[in-house]
Image (cartoon, helix red, strand yellow):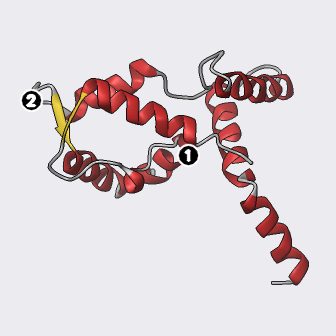
């Protein structure tokens, strides 16, 4: 790899731009707006407003979707799931042909950084809080 190309890659990575562009592309393809450039500008403005606490973070998942994921994991209806369950489901789904793990990463829901122990019980409120926090962190750009 040429030195200029390596420097360019390092610059992009240092500022978190590949992840930002990846998220914007995911939003764009999920929503498929009639005016994509305007949509992207609005999405960036929404991220700025959300970081100031003035609006919700743009995402393909909303709170209801995160709750649905929790309900699927808590099939027994116990009111909690474990860190191990979260990781096991994601590992199982990662073997699917559509590469669910890369989709989770795109959405900011990779379990690699799940902040709970394997046996720790996670209630719905904590699950939603952690998932929404993870989604928010995924938009962090320097």
Q: Is residue 141 or residue 78 the one in the foreground?
A: 141
Image position of 4 (left or right of 85)? right
Q: Label 2, on which residue? A: 76
Q: Position of residue 35 (x, y in %)?
A: 83, 21
Image position of 89 (left or right of 138)? left
Q: Position of residue 38 (x, y in %)?
A: 85, 23
Quarter of the image holding residue 97?
A: bottom left
What whole-number distance in Å separates the C-alpha atoms at marks 1 and 2? 29 Å
Q: Secondary structure at mark 1?
A: helix
At 43% from the left and 52% from the top, the residue drawn is 101
Residue located farthest toward the front when viewing the structure as drawn: 52
Residue located farthest toward the right when viewing the structure as drawn: 4
Viewer can see residue 37 = yes
Badge 1 density bin: few <14, some 14–19, many ≥20, Cα 10 Å: many
Q: Earlier in the sequence, mark 1 or mark 2?
A: 2
The tag on residue 106 is 1
Q: Position of residue 37 (x, y in %)?
A: 85, 28
At 75% from the left and 55% from the top, the residue drawn is 15
Quadrant (top left/top right/bottom left/bottom right) for the N terminus: bottom right
At 86% from the left and 83% from the top, the residue drawn is 2
Q: Secondary structure at mark 2?
A: loop
Q: Position of residue 86 (x, y in %)?
A: 27, 45
Image position of 141 (left or right of 77)? right
How many numbered discs, if any? 2
């Amino acid at each position: 790899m040429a030195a200029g190309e390596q420097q360019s890659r390092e610059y992009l990575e240092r500022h978190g731009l590949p992840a930002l562009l990846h998220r914007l592309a995911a939003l764009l393809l999920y929503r498929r707006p009639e005016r994509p450039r305007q949509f992207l500008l609005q999405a960036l403005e929404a991220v700025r407003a959300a970081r100031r606490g003035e609006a919700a973070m743009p995402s393909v998942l909303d709170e209801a979707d995160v709750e649905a994921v929790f309900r699927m994991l808590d099939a027994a209806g116990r009111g909690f799931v474990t860190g191990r369950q979260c990781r096991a489901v994601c590992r199982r789904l990662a073997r699917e042909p559509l590469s669910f793990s890369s989709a989770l990463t795109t959405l900011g829901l990779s379990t690699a950084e799940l902040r709970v122990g394997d046996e720790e019980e996670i209630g719905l409120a904590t699950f939603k809080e952690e998932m929404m926090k993870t989604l928010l962190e995924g938009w962090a750009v320097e």
